[in-house]
Image (cartoon, rainbow, N blue to C red):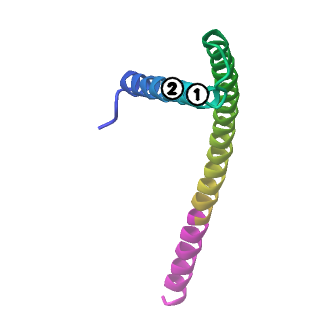
Amino acid sequence: MKPDPDCARGIARMEGYLLWNAEVQEARRHAGRFTDQLPWLTTAQREDVERVYVTDRVAVCRESFSRVAGRAVELRAEYTARYEQLRNRCVALSVAVTGAVTGVCTALTLLTR
Protein backbone atom coordinates (compact mmCIF):
# COMPACT_ATOMS: atom_id res chain seq x y z
CA MET A 1 0.00 0.00 0.00
CA LYS A 2 1.40 3.34 -1.08
CA PRO A 3 1.32 6.19 1.47
CA ASP A 4 -0.84 9.20 0.71
CA PRO A 5 1.39 11.99 -0.72
CA ASP A 6 -0.40 14.65 1.33
CA CYS A 7 0.13 12.61 4.49
CA ALA A 8 3.82 12.06 3.70
CA ARG A 9 4.27 15.77 2.98
CA GLY A 10 2.54 16.65 6.26
CA ILE A 11 4.74 14.27 8.21
CA ALA A 12 7.85 15.72 6.54
CA ARG A 13 6.74 19.24 7.45
CA MET A 14 6.05 18.19 11.05
CA GLU A 15 9.47 16.57 11.23
CA GLY A 16 11.08 19.74 9.89
CA TYR A 17 9.17 21.87 12.37
CA LEU A 18 10.25 19.69 15.29
CA LEU A 19 13.85 19.60 14.08
CA TRP A 20 13.95 23.37 13.71
CA ASN A 21 12.42 23.96 17.16
CA ALA A 22 14.97 21.60 18.70
CA GLU A 23 17.74 23.57 17.01
CA VAL A 24 16.38 26.88 18.34
CA GLN A 25 16.10 25.42 21.86
CA GLU A 26 19.68 24.17 21.61
CA ALA A 27 20.82 27.65 20.56
CA ARG A 28 19.04 29.13 23.58
CA ARG A 29 20.72 26.62 25.91
CA HIS A 30 24.13 27.47 24.44
CA ALA A 31 23.41 31.18 24.78
CA GLY A 32 22.50 30.69 28.43
CA ARG A 33 25.69 28.73 29.08
CA PHE A 34 27.71 31.41 27.28
CA THR A 35 26.26 34.26 29.33
CA ASP A 36 26.67 32.22 32.53
CA GLN A 37 30.41 32.61 31.95
CA LEU A 38 29.99 36.40 32.02
CA PRO A 39 28.67 37.09 35.54
CA TRP A 40 29.37 40.82 35.36
CA LEU A 41 26.63 41.41 32.76
CA THR A 42 23.50 43.20 33.86
CA THR A 43 20.18 41.47 33.19
CA ALA A 44 19.53 43.67 30.14
CA GLN A 45 23.03 43.04 28.78
CA ARG A 46 22.65 39.33 29.37
CA GLU A 47 19.35 39.27 27.47
CA ASP A 48 20.89 41.25 24.60
CA VAL A 49 23.89 38.93 24.37
CA GLU A 50 21.63 35.86 24.45
CA ARG A 51 19.36 37.34 21.78
CA VAL A 52 22.32 38.13 19.49
CA TYR A 53 23.86 34.71 20.13
CA VAL A 54 20.62 32.89 19.33
CA THR A 55 20.01 35.01 16.22
CA ASP A 56 23.52 34.30 14.95
CA ARG A 57 23.32 30.59 15.70
CA VAL A 58 19.91 30.28 14.03
CA ALA A 59 21.24 32.06 10.93
CA VAL A 60 24.21 29.67 10.77
CA CYS A 61 21.88 26.68 11.17
CA ARG A 62 19.57 27.97 8.45
CA GLU A 63 22.53 28.32 6.07
CA SER A 64 23.73 24.82 6.95
CA PHE A 65 20.28 23.31 6.47
CA SER A 66 19.95 25.10 3.12
CA ARG A 67 23.32 23.77 1.99
CA VAL A 68 22.46 20.24 3.09
CA ALA A 69 19.04 20.39 1.41
CA GLY A 70 20.60 21.70 -1.80
CA ARG A 71 23.21 18.97 -1.76
CA ALA A 72 20.51 16.35 -1.15
CA VAL A 73 18.67 17.55 -4.25
CA GLU A 74 21.92 17.40 -6.26
CA LEU A 75 22.68 13.89 -5.00
CA ARG A 76 19.16 12.70 -5.76
CA ALA A 77 19.53 13.94 -9.35
CA GLU A 78 22.97 12.31 -9.66
CA TYR A 79 21.80 9.00 -8.22
CA THR A 80 18.66 9.00 -10.35
CA ALA A 81 20.72 9.55 -13.49
CA ARG A 82 23.17 6.86 -12.44
CA TYR A 83 20.33 4.44 -11.68
CA GLU A 84 18.77 5.08 -15.10
CA GLN A 85 22.14 4.48 -16.77
CA LEU A 86 22.72 1.21 -14.90
CA ARG A 87 19.18 0.03 -15.55
CA ASN A 88 19.56 0.73 -19.28
CA ARG A 89 22.84 -1.19 -19.32
CA CYS A 90 21.24 -4.16 -17.54
CA VAL A 91 18.32 -4.21 -19.96
CA ALA A 92 20.66 -3.98 -22.95
CA LEU A 93 22.85 -6.76 -21.57
CA SER A 94 19.80 -8.94 -20.90
CA VAL A 95 18.53 -8.40 -24.43
CA ALA A 96 21.98 -9.18 -25.87
CA VAL A 97 22.38 -12.34 -23.79
CA THR A 98 18.85 -13.50 -24.63
CA GLY A 99 19.52 -12.86 -28.31
CA ALA A 100 22.83 -14.70 -28.17
CA VAL A 101 21.33 -17.70 -26.38
CA THR A 102 18.41 -17.76 -28.81
CA GLY A 103 20.85 -17.57 -31.73
CA VAL A 104 22.99 -20.40 -30.37
CA CYS A 105 19.93 -22.56 -29.71
CA THR A 106 18.61 -21.85 -33.20
CA ALA A 107 22.00 -22.66 -34.76
CA LEU A 108 22.27 -25.91 -32.80
CA THR A 109 18.74 -26.87 -33.78
CA LEU A 110 19.49 -26.24 -37.46
CA LEU A 111 22.82 -28.08 -37.29
CA THR A 112 21.35 -31.16 -35.62
CA ARG A 113 18.62 -31.69 -38.22
| Nearer-the-camera pick, 96 or 77 | 77
**Which residue is located at x 39 percent, y 21 percent?**
6
Q: Quadrant of the N terminus?
A: top left
Query: Is the residue 54 above or below the residue 71 in the image?
Result: above
| Nearer-the-camera pick, 106 or 54 | 54
Amino acid under label 2? Gln
Q: Residue 103 in magenta?
A: yes
Residue 44 in the image: state x and y as whole percent. 63, 9
Label 2 CA crowd tier, 10 Å (few <14, some 14–19, many 20+)? some
The disc at residue 27 is 1
| Nearer-the-camera pick, 31 or 27 | 31
Query: Is the residue 41 above or below the residue 12 in the image?
Result: above
Badges 1 and 2: C-beta atoms under 8 Å apart? yes
**Which residue is located at x 51 percent, y 26 percent?**
25
The residue identified by callout 2 is 25
Q: Residue 90 in magenta?
A: no
**Which residue is located at x 44 percent, y 29 percent?**
15
Q: At numbered mark 2, what does the secondary structure look like: helix, strand or loop?
A: helix
